[in-house]
Image (spheres, rainbow, N blue to C red):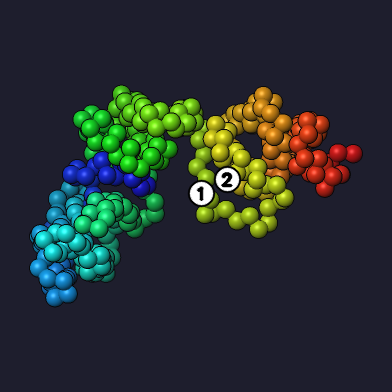
Amino acid sequence: MLLSESLAWSLEGYDCSGIRVYCDKSHAQEIADSFITDFTEFWEEAVEKVEEEYGDCEDTDLPVSIEFTDYGFFITVLQLEVKYSFGEYYELDYGPDAFNAAFANMKNSYPQIEYDGYITYPLCDAKAGDVVQYEISSHGNVETYDFVGKALATLCVFDLEEVFAVELENYYDFKDSIKSLHAYRNYIGETGLENAFQVILNVAEENDEDVEELETLIEQLNSGTFVEIDEEDVDDSNLPDGYMEALEMFMKAEELGAPKPKVTEVVSSEGRFDLVIAQAEEGDAESKFIAGKYFIACHIDEETERAIRWIQEAADEGIEEAEEYMNNNPELFD
């Protein structure tokens, strides 16, 4: 998984960018040497291209190094974009293309290898600053990386106030930072995690953010009741009327832990319906209406009677949408 931008910036200078290459230890030296030989050639060509187009380059040392391990070897990856004009600017394509070409050669020459990695580094010039982050893997998604976990553990001991808090002020990515830190909790440790969460809550409070919402997210993550929603994966073309409105409402109310949208099935963790019911029973008329639509749209049959009652109560309290819903669905309210 990728880190929040605040965390990625905070890890500048830490050794937490690279690729693990899994291979027979007896072949590791040969494979690593082959990669370095190819990349050195392609990198030098990239630097030449940049110099031809823009003038002298700055810091043209090879931005990778190799460390041999029990599983094969680790490729440390620093900034791949070639800088020029005394380091004031960088060229976006030639350096990364050189790395990709060398890595592709290694994969083609040694198809038995497997690999996974997380590459991140700041990319700043006279015009702007950004942070590069991406993952690479031969065997699907990887939730965490040991080398990133070790860096985060160190950050949570030494650099929370001086570094991380400053980056939070720049990006306000409180929720993403909480999720990233929690994913690496086994590396960070309980004390480090609590300290990091407190820094996030402190910065959020100083900037008038909804601290209670963040505290709820932390509680959900710690209890295992949080479910991530990927909005890009949602296909609402065949969903019943009212479903997406209901889902959106519950995504905003994160204490409910909204499930992934399915018409006939709800993937829920233990206790979610209790939370939804409590929120509606204790909430205002609009909460009752939205919760009622939610249960009906998701075909949660055991809660239909309750949902109908909520919608009727919302209509009685003057919610026009509830009245319209009842008129459009008379079969439910006979």
Residue at x-position 15% and y-position 50%:
68
The residue that disc 2 covers is 260
Left/right placement of residue 16 relative to residue 264 reads left
Element marked by disc 2:
loop
**In the rendered image, is residue 104 in sight?**
yes
Q: How many numbered marks does the figure carry?
A: 2
Q: Quadrant of the C terminus?
A: top right
Residue 179, percent across and down?
41, 38
Residue 284, percent across and down?
69, 28
Residue at x-position 71% and y-position 51%:
240
Label 1: few (<14), some or many (≥20) within 10 Å? few
The residue type indicated by label 1 comes to Asp
Residue 103, percent across and down?
24, 64
**In the rendered image, is residue 37 in sight?**
no
Q: CA distance from mark 1 to mark 2?
A: 8 Å
Label 2: few (<14), some or many (≥20) within 10 Å? some
The residue type indicated by label 2 comes to Lys
Q: Are marks 1 and 2 in contact (CB under 8 Å)?
A: yes
- Which comes sooner in the sequence, label 1 or label 2? 1
* In this view, 245 is above or below 284: below
The residue that disc 1 covers is 230
Viewer-side residue, 230 vs 93:
93
Asked which quadrant contains residue 181, the reply is top left
Tell which residue pokes out farthest to the right in this image. 334
